[in-house]
């Protein structure tokens, strides 16, 4: 007896990877790096494992207008993928992270937003990828020695200069210790619906007689 198997993947968790052309990325990243340096200089002393971070308003500063535009265009394409383009997103926070060798970002999510993302300015190499954790509450994942995208309980997005990774804000993630010899420079951002309460928060069902 022949059996035909089909697989239906339920509730997928998308990551959007957006790359700008290397020829454009190099000069753009050099400009961003210089802008970041002016904000964090003179650099305060750091505790071991910590990083330098700018204020969270970079998207409002003229030196980051080009980046803000890039984030907005990328957010629009993500909304089109989700078929939610009627509900525009706005940047609610945008900040740079400069991670020296040995520093890391512990596990966290980005509350009160719909989408979050990171843009890579400079990447030293190993230990700088972003690691996303399986959001499902109970995982029984037998170890076969070869994880796949349906058996792994963590998954990595590889960074590269000029790359943007956008993900659901609730998805917990961390960045392991920078094992390279140079700094890792990235810019994080959050996106939320501009008029969430007015356009999206009302009940999605119709009233019926006697309902309360
Ligand atoms: Fe994050």
Image (spheres, grey):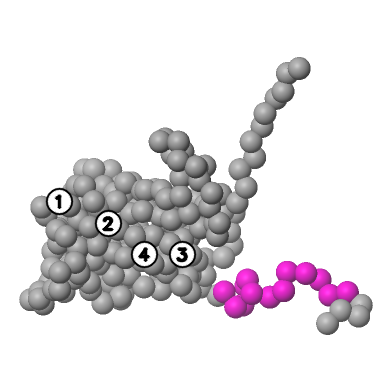
Q: Residue at x 23, y 73 (%)?
A: 54
- Residue 187 shows up from this direction: yes
SS under mark 1: loop
Say whether disc 1 or disc 3 marks the residue closer to the N-terminus: 3
Where is residue 160? Give x, y as percent: 26, 47
Which sits earlier in the primary sequence, circle 4 or circle 1?
Answer: 4
Name the dominant secondary structure of the magenta segment.
Answer: loop
Tag 1–tag 3 contact (CB < 8 Å): no
Which residue is painted at 15% across and 51% down in the image? 180
Badge 3 marks a residue whose secondary structure is loop
Does 9 appear in magenta?
A: no
Left or right? Give the position of 200 relative to 99. right
> How dense is the environment of label 4, judged by Cα within 10 Å: few (below 14), some, or many (20 and up)?
few
Q: Nearer the viewer, mark 4 or mark 3?
A: 4
Query: Which mark is first along the chain, 2 or 4?
Result: 4
Question: Is 159 situated left or right of 116 in this image?
Answer: left
Q: Measure how far apart labels 4 and 1 are at the Cα level.
A: 20 Å
Start-end of magenta stretch: 196-208
Residue beneath disc 1: 180
Disc 3, ligand 1: is the CB inside 8 Å? no
3 vs 2, front mark: 2
Secondary structure type for disc 2? loop
Q: Which residue is mark 2?
A: 176
């Amino acid at each position: 007896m022949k059996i035909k198997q089909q697989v239906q993947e339920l509730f997928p968790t998308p990551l959007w990877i957006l790359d700008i052309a290397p020829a454009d990325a190099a000069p753009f990243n050099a400009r961003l790096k210089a802008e970041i340096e002016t904000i964090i200089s003179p650099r305060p002393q750091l505790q071991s494992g910590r990083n330098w971070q700018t204020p969270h308003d970079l998207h409002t500063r003229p030196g980051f207008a080009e980046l803000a535009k890039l984030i907005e265009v990328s957010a629009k394409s993500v909304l089109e993928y989700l078929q939610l383009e009627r509900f525009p997103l706005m940047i609610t926070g945008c900040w740079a992270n400069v991670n020296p060798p040995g520093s890391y970002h512990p596990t966290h999510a980005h509350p009160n937003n719909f989408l979050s993302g990171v843009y890579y300015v400079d990447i030293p190499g190993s230990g700088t990828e972003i690691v996303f954790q399986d959001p499902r509450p109970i995982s029984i994942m037998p170890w076969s020695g070869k994880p796949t995208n349906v058996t792994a309980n963590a998954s990595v997005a590889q960074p590269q200069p000029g790359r943007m990774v956008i993900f659901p804000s609730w998805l917990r993630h961390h960045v392991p210790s920078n094992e390279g010899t140079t700094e890792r420079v990235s810019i994080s951002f959050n996106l939320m619906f501009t008029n969430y309460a007015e356009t999206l928060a009302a009940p999605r069902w119709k009233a019926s007689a006697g309902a309360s």
